[in-house]
Image (tube, grey):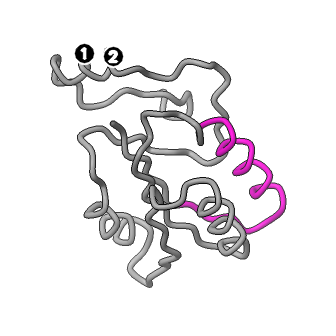
């Protein structure tokens, strides 16, 4: 199975709208069984309520914003990841296909020691 990891800021209506679109596009994926989410910003309570209602005990939620920064706070969250595979959720990206990944493909990734599978164009050079 796959852990979902995110540490994002939702601080205006537009970002909240994009978060909702993105979440609705991935929330029912049966492979996602552990959600480790940190949300900062003016809408963090609203985001938490949406996630808790949909995910129940699959969710580990926090709203840390230490003075040590995003990277430090993210590294503190890693202990809550329960799976070999981690989906780094970018909250303003929307899944546009019915297919994401299946168990057979996860096994192929594991058997071939794949460390990283890019799903977003934003990381392209």
Q: Quadrant of residue 114?
A: top left
Q: CA distance from mark 1 to mark 2?
A: 5 Å
- Residue at the image point whose x is 44% and y is 82% from the top: 66
Image: 101 above or below 18: above
On whether residue 14 falls in the magenta region, the answer is: yes
Count of all numbered marks drawn on residues in the image: 2
Image: 52 above or below 86: below
Q: Nearer the viewer, residue 15 or 121?
A: 15
Q: Kindly indicate whether the residue at mark 2 contacts the one at mark 1 (C-beta within 8 angstroms).
A: yes
Secondary structure mostly taken by the magenta-highlighted segment of the chain = helix
Task: Indicate the secondary structure of the residue bearing disc 2.
Answer: helix
- Judging by the rendered image, the residue that carries numbered circle 1 is 108
- Residue at the image point whose x is 45% and y is 55% from the top: 58
Residue 72 picture location, percent across and down:
34, 71
Residue 18 picture location, percent across and down:
75, 48
Residue 25 picture location, percent across and down:
66, 35
- Judging by the rendered image, the residue that carries numbered circle 2 is 105
Q: Which residues are magenta?
A: 8-26
Crowding at label 2, few (<14), some or many (≥20) Cα neighbours within 10 Å? few
Q: Quadrant of residue 1?
A: top left
Q: Quadrant of residue 69?
A: bottom left
Q: Is residue 20 left or right of residue 89?
A: right
Q: Nearer the viewer, residue 66 or 97?
A: 97
On whether residue 82 falls in the magenta region, the answer is: no
- Residue at the image point whose x is 64% and y is 38% from the top: 93
Q: Which mark is residue 55?
A: none
Task: Indicate the secondary structure of the residue bearing disc 1.
Answer: helix
The outermost residue toward the bottom is 67
């Amino acid at each position: 199975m796959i852990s979902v990891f995110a540490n994002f800021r939702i601080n205006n209506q537009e970002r909240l709208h994009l978060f909702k679109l993105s979440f609705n596009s991935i929330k029912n994926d049966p492979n996602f069984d552990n959600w480790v989410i940190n949300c900062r910003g003016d809408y963090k309570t609203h985001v938490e309520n949406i996630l808790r209602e949909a995910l129940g005990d699959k969710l580990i939620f926090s709203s840390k914003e230490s003075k040590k920064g995003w990277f430090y706070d993210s590294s503190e969250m890693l202990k809550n990841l329960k799976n070999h595979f981690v989906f780094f959720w970018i909250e303003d990206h929307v899944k546009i296909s019915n297919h994401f990944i299946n168990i057979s493909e996860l096994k192929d990734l594991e058997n071939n020691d794949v460390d990283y599978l890019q799903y977003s164009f934003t990381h392209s050079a």
